[in-house]
Amino acid sequence: MSEQLIGRYHGDKKTLFWLVMKTSFLTLITLGIYRFWAKTRIRKYLWSGTAAGQDSFEYTGTGLEKFLGFLAAIVVLAIYLGIVQMILLFFGLSLMADATTTAGQIAQIVSIYISFFAVMPLILFAQYRARRYKMARTRWRGIRFGMDSAAWGFVWRAIAHSFLTIITLGLMVPRQTFYLEKYMADRTWFGDAQFVQNGRWQSLYPGLKHIGLGFLILIGAGVVAATLEAFRVAFFLGVVGYIWLIFGSVYYRIFALNYLTDNKLLNGQIGFYSDAQAGKVVGITIKGTLLIALVGAVIGLVFTGVSAALLTSVDFQNPSDLMGVVGGALGIIGFVAYIGFLLLLSALSFIWITQPIIAHVVDNIVLSGAEHLDAIHQRSADAGADADGFADALDIGGAI
């Protein structure tokens, strides 16, 4: 009988809350520089709180490594974007074109689109390299994960799949999802054992059912508005359709996660099973959002009450130096309260939304064929490459 290991997340809300608060504060007072160390510390905590069987994962990345990777990426991006702008200027185009004339507006729009498509390959490049870096800095049972250096192959495939998806009005989304994940999974290693993504992309179509229903509701809203002129009913249907689309996107992502996980193999003998629930993820998000909104409302009322109390202590009919003191105090209190409020929201989002979703997904993953793990041996360490640098520089590195 095949030996199984069950995923388990054992992170603590209180510990994560204070970790996020502290690292966010240090990021603030260092004008953002500490964010590389902050993300590293949070990853270390989340990785160590995730286990398969009795063995937790380990994250070995460093903040300095990420910071240096970011600096290197900034230099490359500056040179690359500078060359793109020089080419645009050569053809009489510029992002700063005079928009007061029709010709200037057209030139500006064309420049924006050209610049966007010029950066797109780098964004895709960054996505692959970010995943490769996280794999290279992850260990389990003392054995390293890793990925092949194949980012540019991912880039041109992602561009081709995206183009196919666009011209088919989204009908090829399952194909794009499957083959891009297969490209990355087939180049991922645990020690000297290679992952393989099996399955069929057509099997992802059932995951689109709620997205399709959401679009049908929105189309129905348009028909009601155009033919019956029942604008209130159309508005209601539009809201329902929009909400259904959001749920549909979450449902598709969870459906794809489960299917792709169920069809992965490690070393041809070790399999996986995932039973995450879209409804549970949506429920966690809604509950967390409501709790955060409630805390925000309470803090807002308290701040308003304190401000009102300070203002009522001042006699505006007889101005004095006290008014200046009170005004300055209110300004300082307001600024500190606003910064603290943002830090608090970030920490609460982690413990009420991010961590519970991670726990739900991890707790519903099972590894089968664990008896074959002992045959897997250590792999040589992969170079840090840009260490998430391009992902951070292009502002797509916000996810842990």
Image (cartoon, rainbow, N blue to C red):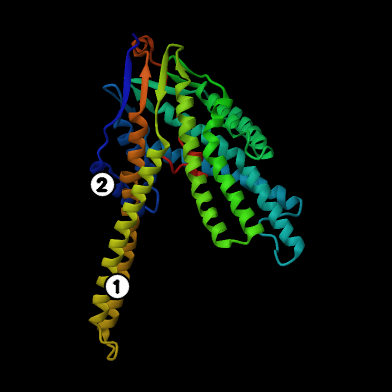
Image-quadrant location for residue 215: top right
Question: For the point 32% across and 19% down, which residue is it?
Answer: 5
> Which is more toward the observer, 29 or 105?
105
Kindly identify which numbered label has been placed on residue 378: none
Location of the N terminus by quadrant is top left
| Amino acid at circle 2 | Trp
From what the image shows, is residue 287 above or below residue 41? Answer: below
| Amino acid at circle 1 | Leu
Name the element at disc 2: helix
Q: CA distance from mark 1 to mark 2?
A: 27 Å
From what the image shows, is residue 188 above or below residue 357? Answer: above
Residue at the spot of label 1: 330
From what the image shows, is residue 71 above or below residue 261? Answer: below
Q: Is residue 272 left or right of residue 237?
A: left
Residue at the spot of label 2: 18
Name the element at disc 1: helix
> Which is more toward the observer, 170 or 60?
170
* Total numbered labels placed on residues in the image: 2
Q: Is residue 297 left or right of residue 160?
A: left
Asked whether the viewer can see residue 353, the reply is: yes
